[in-house]
Amino acid sequence: MTGRLKISLVAAAVAVLAVGVPFTTSFVILLVTRALAFSILVMSLDILLGFTGLASLGQAAYFGVGAYMTAILATKYQIGLGFDFWLVVLLGLMIGAVLAAVFGLLAIRASGVYFLMITLALGQCVWGLAYRWNSLTGGDNGINIQVRPKFGIDLSNEVTFFYVVLAIFAASLLAMYVLVRSPFGRSLAGIRERELRMKILGYNTWLHKYIAFVIAGAFGGLSGVLWAHTAGIVSPDNVVLTTSVDALLMAVLGGAGTLVGGAIGAFIVIAIREYLSTLVPWWQYVLGGMYVLTIFYLPSGLMGIPARLRRRRGAPGSPGGEEKLAAAPS
Amino acid sequence: MGVNYWLIQAFNGISYGALLFLVGSGLSLIFGVMRIVNLSHGSYFLLGGYVALTVIWTTGSWVLAIPVAALAIGGVGLVMERVFLRPLGFDPLRQVLLTVGFAFLFQQAALDIWSGNNFDIEPPALLTRSIQVGGLYLPLYRVFMIAIAAVIGLVLWLAMEKTRIGAMVRATVDDAQMARGVGIDTSRISMFIFALGAGLAALGGVIGGAFLGIYPGLDFEILPLAFAVVIIGGMGSLGGAAIGALLVGLADNFGKALFPEISYFTLYAPMALILAVKPTGLFGRE
């Protein structure tokens, strides 16, 4: 598949969502909005996982600070409920980036399993604060956000809100796509494939990884801002280890190193968790089983299926690295 | 707040550390031998507690519940290692995700079998009393926890340092490739250590179930603490796990008593710092 065809497919999918979703039930609209908001976090993780080769177990930390910041500003200071919603969006990007800039100083030196562990520890630091710092975060109960922003348009209307989230999602996807296609993104891929080679070529690989880490943090914060208004409640559950793990699983399920794969993974997992769970009590077997099967039989994720089919048919598959990169161990 | 208050806090911290040692030592050995970040370790803890409950409900024997739970979950670990982790080869990301997939499956299975209620494991009446030591009333159960962790720690240490199998395990931790080269069956060692680690976590679940309770979600609550033990102590080192468990137990208790609002932060921030400075942990082998 050529690059242009891929872009048109993604654009078509976004257009289908934009046209089709408002005609569905309010439950579906909410579900899609949630998936879109969370997708940004998963795609931000994919910048690290799929394009830089860093598997992080603490991405929920950035999601969490973005969400908590939104909730605290909205409930304690009434900031972000009018036009200043866009200021909060900006602040969300910034707080995620700042946190990642601090955490990155500690984490980037490590690689492989140690990177997993240190990001886990850093994520737990944020969770610990969210869980325990009652006066600021409301502790275990979290913070309820009563109203959504209203500025000319009313975001408490679910269709309007859906369009805002969809627009931010599309803009984020585009920004990240441009990033990974840029020379900077190419050198990240070089680091993923063989860091030593890049070092010898004269690249400052530490700095490259650090910048990628900070950018991923920024989008994580943005995702948190949207999530806070989507869910209407922010709690330690948003920062807990399992949320980081979820993001990782969604990225791998969709296909690491593809960006949109992360969004697909998020849609599927959220659909199973929030829709299938209303139908059958054993939905978690489906989820767990799907993870296990994906890891065994689809190391390149759902996005790797077309390439696989092509190879099976004997046609010359795409020589590109997309297939290789997801399967490549860090 | 007199001296006694602090002594009680220290005692509580040490006894909590004893529990964490049971969970952390297994995780540390598994990491040392196999380099696996095992995110289903918390599930073994929880499942151990549940199996113990079933044994207690059917036979009424708490003493019997301990070995049955440890063996049953050790068996689960063994099967998981043989059937799923072994064929996966060495890839930290896929291993992590696989163990999470299993953690979800275990969660659902536990929900189906034991329902979502909160349970307590009732220890024998003998252990629910308190003893008086120098003006302090110490719950006997916590003394028992410290004793059992000490005994198990000692047995593990002797097994690692004085037996042939222990030497093989240490060799595998230090350099798996060389160990294979001199004829050590590292695959067997991995299987054995994984089962042992799972069994130890289950044992922790039975012992800890008396004062933590047994409920859905406990698995992912205990897991990060176990990782803190492993990281602070050093991966693959038993002595390190003991010291790490003690430090985490004390930090947790004093943190909650002294500055409750940031108590978890004071636990995990040092963990991150240690990792950043010395990735193998304070007492880990290079």
Image (spheres, coloured by chain):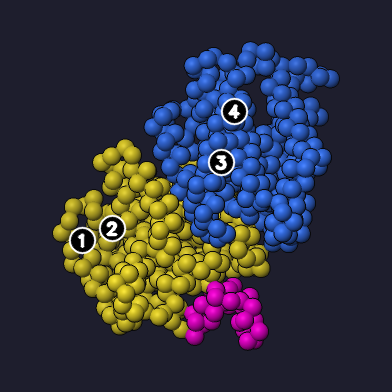
Chain colours: A yellow, B blue
Residue B117, labelled with which disc? none
Q: Which residue is mark 1?
A: A21
Find residue A326 and report its horizontal and vertical position in percent.
Answer: 46, 68
Residue B103 at x, y = what percent? Answer: 48, 44
The CA span between labels 1 and 3 is: 47 Å
Residue assigned mark 3 = B78
Front: mark 4 or 3: 3
Relative to A270, residue B111 above or below: above
Q: Which mark is residue A32?
A: 2
Q: Quadrant of the N terminus of chain A?
A: bottom left
- Indicate the secondary structure of the residue bearing disc 4: helix
Q: Amino acid at mark 2?
A: Val
Sequence-wise first label, 4 or 3: 3
Marks 4 and 1 close (CB-CB < 8 Å): no
Q: Say if mark 1 contacts mark 2, CB within 8 Å.
A: yes
Tell me the kind of residue under disc 3. Leu
- Determine contact: label 2, label 3, CB under 8 Å: no
Mark nearest the camera among 1 and 3 is: 3
Quadrant of the frame with the C terminus of chain A: bottom right
| Amino acid at circle 1 | Val
> Helix, strand, or loop for circle 1?
helix
Which chain does tag 4 point to?
A: B
Which chain does tag 3 point to?
Answer: B
